Amino acid sequence: MTVEIEPDSGSFNVEVRARGPASAGRTDLRARAWVLLALDASARNGITPMSKLRFHRFIYLTNALSPVYDVQAADERIVKYQRGQFYPDLQWHLDRLMAAGLVRIANIRHFEDEDGPWMEADYRLGRPAIHAIERLVALDDMRALSTFLQEVAKAFANHQEDVLDDLILADLTYADARRARGSVINFSQPRDNLSVQAANSFMTITRDPRMISASDRLYLYVDYMDRLHHRPLRRA
């Protein structure tokens, strides 16, 4: 299966082909699909437009919690930046989608603060993205990804607007004081993903763990982050 972007038309071309092992190109295409579906999930839950800062923090949360839904993360590694979560590769894909007309950008602004220079902007889906997303979710794996992203967006949007940007900084894996700024956080090893460990721990609060669904674990963990956000945290 390949999903191709046609820059001139601003659309996706979805084809099924017999191929060998996954290439870097296919990985790139999946990353762009993840970005599109993440923006779609946030929009469906009232979080639109999405600032650049919030976009990267939301993407981080989806990467951190993807094992709860048995979904492969878009990126299993992230550098612990001073400003917070940021994915250079996914920003590149976001910019490519914008150039293709699938994503719109507004309110571009450049500034420098205590965290250094930064370019901020607001992103939302463009009209051509509607058809692209319809074709994506016709594929089983993309539909499963969309379901997962929708659930994370619902749990995220369930909190006050004024705390959303900083809420994800309270994530257990990212806020772990043993990880200094500039270090690499790697989700590929389950023992290092404190976020999933905490989410799955909620299954122990009932006699039958099956009563706590994957969706329940997402909601409970994001609620837990909100409580942590209102406590003083020791930051590395």
Image (cartoon, rainbow, N blue to C red):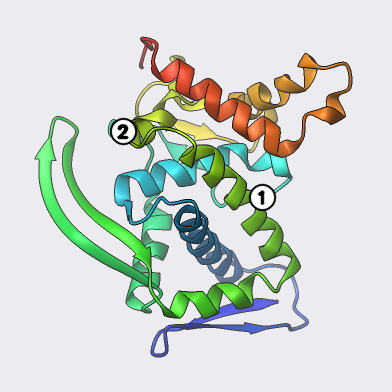
Residue found at x 74% / y 45%: 70
Residue holding disc 2? 162
Q: Is residue 182 above or below residue 10?
A: above
**Spot occupied by residue 227 in the image (x, y as percentages of width and height):** 47, 17
Q: Is residue 232 above or below residue 63?
A: above
Query: Which of the labelled discs sits on residue 100, or is there none?
Result: none
Picture quadrant of residue 203: top right
Q: Is residue 187 above or below residue 91?
A: above
Residue holding disc 1? 72
Image quarter in which the N terminus is found? bottom right
Q: Is residue 150 above or below residue 230?
A: below
Count of numbered labels shown in the rendering? 2
Residue found at x 22% / y 63%: 106
| Residue neighbourhood size for the residue with mark 2, other residues' Cα within 10 Å, grouped as few (<14), some (14–19), many (≥20) | few
Q: Is residue 57 left or right of residue 141?
A: left
Image quarter in which the C terminus is found? top left
Query: Label 1's element?
Result: loop
Q: Is residue 41 left or right of residue 190?
A: left
The three-letter code of the residue at mark 2 reads: Asp
Query: Label 2's element?
Result: helix
